Image: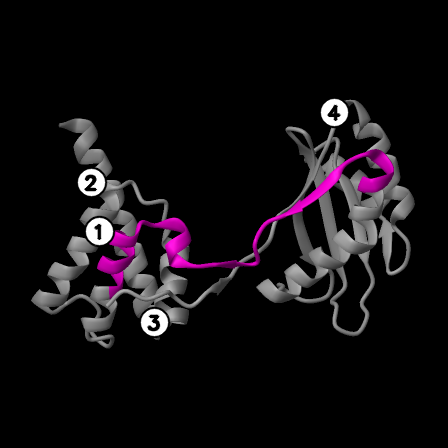
Amino acid sequence: MSTTSKPLDIFQDLYLRGPTSAVAALRQALKDRATPPWRYATEKEEQLRELGEEGDALAFERAVTPGFEAAGLVLIADDDGLKVANIVPRELSELTHRAYNAILADFASEVARPAAMDAGYSVVMSNSTLQLENVVSPAVAEALRRFSVLANKSTGASHPLDRDRWFDFILLAHRENAQLDASVLARWLSESEGWFEDCARDLAGEYERSRSLLTRYEASA
């Protein structure tokens, strides 16, 4: 039954890595490289400070152009440089994973990489997709896939045999301390395996509660 799961779109991260002694030069280079459709948003930084947010944040905005939504982007200090903390749409209520990543990639090519070269830094971006096999062992992935393939997707884990397979997956995930959070599990079930979203969320919630209960039990034993 072993196979590779369908990749899930995820929000990417962007880091600027380099010598801490040159971070001031990097910050100035980022401001200088922010040319249309990007701009350095000083007024946004003032708003962030008034709200008690990161005092060393850098704020940028991108104008809407074909293929890109209008958005604001915030950089904050990281261990050895800076990182993008968030990208927020200026006109929409939210950005899809792909729209977010497209704006981030545009910032990287138009602003971050040129500025990094000026200041002796490098730009590092995380992957835009995630597969189940990236976060759990083959055994845990196989146990989850076995449950999903054999279960009645309209009833969840209510059938005794489905319940047993579901419990087997949870116990194995807990035993191996699998770094699989409930939100990723819900998306994998619905987007990769075809479960109804409500049922996927219910199962993910049960998974999270079960993991917490098992942890609490072990701590009290």
The answer to whether the residues at label 1 and label 2 have Cβ atoms under 8 Å apart is yes
Task: Say above or below: 6 vs 127.
Answer: below
Pinpoint residue 17: horizontal percent, then vertical percent. Answer: 70, 35
Image depth: mark 2 or mark 3 in front: 3
The answer to whether the residues at label 2 and label 3 have Cβ atoms under 8 Å apart is no
What is the distance, in whole Å, between disc 3 and disc 4 at their CAs? 45 Å
Name which residue lies at 18% across and 59% down. 166
Query: Where on the picture, by quarter, is residue 53?
Result: top right
Image depth: mark 1 or mark 2 in front: 1
The answer to whether the residues at label 2 and label 4 have Cβ atoms under 8 Å apart is no
Visible residue check, residue 151:
no
Magenta part of the chain: 116-145
Name which residue lies at 35% across and 75% down. 194
User: Sequence order check: which comes first, mark 3 or mark 1?
Assistant: 1
Task: Say above or below: 175 vs 186.
Answer: above
What is the distance, in whole Å, between disc 4 and disc 1 at their CAs? 43 Å
Residue 193's mark?
3
